């Protein structure tokens, strides 16, 4: 009964189809928003990059703790970018957009964003445990640090463990992306339940599988590029993707059938 009610609520938001090249437009619009209101954006990026560096330092000697910390970090980062969605919305409306706009997005209301963030964190924990169990069970030698992972799992030519690990990660990451790509900005902008928002996100992905696969690849590529610079690139990449994600939501969803969050 709850599921059917959530689906009915989800259908009050109409899903649009977009062209294959649309993700590049989202990046262009996201960059424009970052340049129009750089202070809060770069502050978001600096805080998240600094937190990532703390994780890197604190878990440097424990590979699975490090992997788990970064998995959780990357999954929760879109939730922490909620303030950036609010800034992009304000800019589109011609309203004042500043740090106060971003902070106001986190003003206690009904806990939907917090609930969704916790669900993402739980999903990330599940992946870390599954990944650790897989490597521990099938690696021919113990894996205690990133160098061991590279030597024992990635480089051997006579083993398919790394390929299987990547495949499993992709299988688990795809539904998490489909569940969150639209849900977060939708929860910020409209009165809708968490499950209904997730179903709306899935509907958007099913209606636009190729453009959103490209969008997922762009997100992954830019995030990896940001991490490759000792996380410093995330200072710009995180807010850029946050603003761009708002424009993805605007193009993909017509939420006029749902009440607006002021």
Image: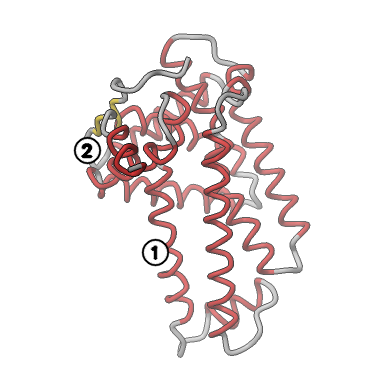
Location of the N terminus by quadrant is: top left
Residue 160 visible in image = yes
Kindly tell me whether residue 237 is visible in this rendering: no
How packed mark 1 is, by other alpha carbons closer than 10 Å (few <14, some 14-19, many 20 or more), is few
The residues bearing labels 2 and 1 have C-alpha atoms spaced at a distance of 25 Å
Q: Position of residue 178 (x, y in %)?
A: 37, 48
Q: Which residue is mark 2?
A: 19
Local packing at callout 2 (Cα closer than 10 Å; few below 14, some 14-19, many 20+) is: few
Give me the residue at 42% from left, 25% from top: 191
Rendered image quadrant of residue 163: bottom left
Query: Relative to 24, is 160 above or below?
Result: below
What residue appears at the point 29 percent right and 41 percent down from the top-left corner? 4
Residue carrying label 1: 171
Q: Nearer the viewer, mark 2 or mark 1?
A: 1
- Residue 49 is tagged as none
From the viewer's side, name the closer residue of 181 and 200. 200
Q: Nearer the viewer, residue 207 or 233?
A: 207
Is 122 situated left or right of 62 in this image? left
Q: Indicate the position of residue 92 as horizontal and vertical percent values.
A: 41, 16
User: At numbered mark 2, what does the secondary structure look like: helix, strand or loop?
Assistant: loop
The reply, left or right, for residue 41 in relation to residue 171 is right
Question: Vertically, is 145 above or below 30?
Answer: below
> In this image, 143 relative to 172: left or right?
right
**Residue 103 image point, x, y percent:** 63, 23
Asked if marks 2 and 1 touch (Cβ < 8 Å), the reply is: no
């Amino acid at each position: 009964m709850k599921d059917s009610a959530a689906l009915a609520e989800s259908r009050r938001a109409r899903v649009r189809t977009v062209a294959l090249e649309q993700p590049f437009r989202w990046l262009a619009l996201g960059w424009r928003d970052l340049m129009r209101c750089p202070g809060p954006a770069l502050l978001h990026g600096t805080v998240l990059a600094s937190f990532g560096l703390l994780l890197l330092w604190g878990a440097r000697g424990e590979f699975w703790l490090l992997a788990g910390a970064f998995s959780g970090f990357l999954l929760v980062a879109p939730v922490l970018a909620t303030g950036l969605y609010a800034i992009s919305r304000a800019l589109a409306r011609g309203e004042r957009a500043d740090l106060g706009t971003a902070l106001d997005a986190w003003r206690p209301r009904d806990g939907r964003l917090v609930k969704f963030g916790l669900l993402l964190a739980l999903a990330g924990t599940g992946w870390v445990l599954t990944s650790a169990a897989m490597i521990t069970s099938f690696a021919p030698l113990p894996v205690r640090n990133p160098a061991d992972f590279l030597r024992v799992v990635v480089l051997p030519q006579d083993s398919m463990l790394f390929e299987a690990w990547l495949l499993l990660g992709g299988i688990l990451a795809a539904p998490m992306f489909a569940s969150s790509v639209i849900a977060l900005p939708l929860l910020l902008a409209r009165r809708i339940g968490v499950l209904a928002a997730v179903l709306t996100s899935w509907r958007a992905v099913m209606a636009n599988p190729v453009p959103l696969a490209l969008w997922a690849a762009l997100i992954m590529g830019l995030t990896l590029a940001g991490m490759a610079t000792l996380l410093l690139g995330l200072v710009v990449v995180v807010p850029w993707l946050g603003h761009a994600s708002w424009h993805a939501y605007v193009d993909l969803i017509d939420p006029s059938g749902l009440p607006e969050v002021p």
